[in-house]
Amino acid sequence: MPKMKTKSSAKKRFKVSATGKIIAGQAGKRHGMIKRTAKFIRNARGTTTLSEADRKIVLKYMPYDR
């Protein structure tokens, strides 16, 4: 049986934590910052963990990263 392939886009964007959660960058910060509130920009700093539904989808893209 051949090895399964990892999606290159997924390995660049997501990381699996030690407890199995998926860590991703915050969305919505590429452009249009003038119309965003200061609270939004402050809360969208750093990374976030994905929801359980999204976690299942992303783990299919990275079969060996568990």
Image (tube, rainbow, N blue to C red):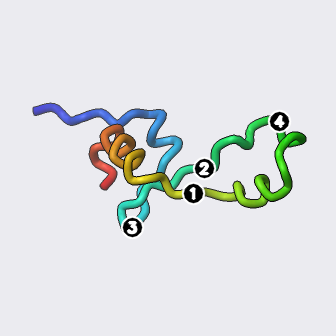
| Element class at badge 2 | strand
Asked whether, in this view, residue 12 is left or right of residue 16, the answer is: right
Q: The C terminus lies in which quarter of the figure?
A: bottom left
Q: Do the residues bearing badges 1 and 2 touch, measured as CB atoms within 8 Å? A: yes
Q: Do the residues bearing badges 2 and 3 touch, measured as CB atoms within 8 Å? A: no
Q: How far is mark 3 from mark 1, CA to CA? A: 15 Å
| Element class at badge 1 | strand
Mark 2 or 3 closer to N-term? 3
Asked whether, in this view, residue 38 is left or right of residue 53, the answer is: right
Q: Which residue is mark 4?
A: 32
Point 78% across, 53% down: residue: 41
Mark 4 or 2 closer to N-term? 2
Categorize mark 3 by other alpha carbons within 10 Å: few (<14), some (14-19), many (20+). few
Q: Which residue is mark 3?
A: 18
Rendered location of residue 63, percent (x, y): 28, 44
Q: The N terminus lies in which quarter of the figure?
A: top left
| Numbered circle sitting on residue 7 | none
Q: Which residue is mark 1?
A: 48
Residue 58, quarter of the rendered image:
top left
Q: Nearer the viewer, mark 3 or mark 4?
A: 4
Q: How far is mark 2 from mark 3, CA to CA? A: 17 Å
Q: How far is mark 4 from mark 2, CA to CA? A: 17 Å
Categorize mark 2 by other alpha carbons within 10 Å: few (<14), some (14-19), many (20+). some
Q: Nearer the viewer, mark 4 or mark 2?
A: 4
Q: Amino acid at mark 2?
A: Gly
Categorize mark 1 by other alpha carbons within 10 Å: few (<14), some (14-19), many (20+). some
Q: Amino acid at mark 1?
A: Thr
Q: Amino acid at mark 3?
A: Ala
Mark 1 or 4 closer to N-term? 4
Asked whether, in this view, residue 26 is left or right of residue 61, the answer is: right
| Element class at badge 3 | loop
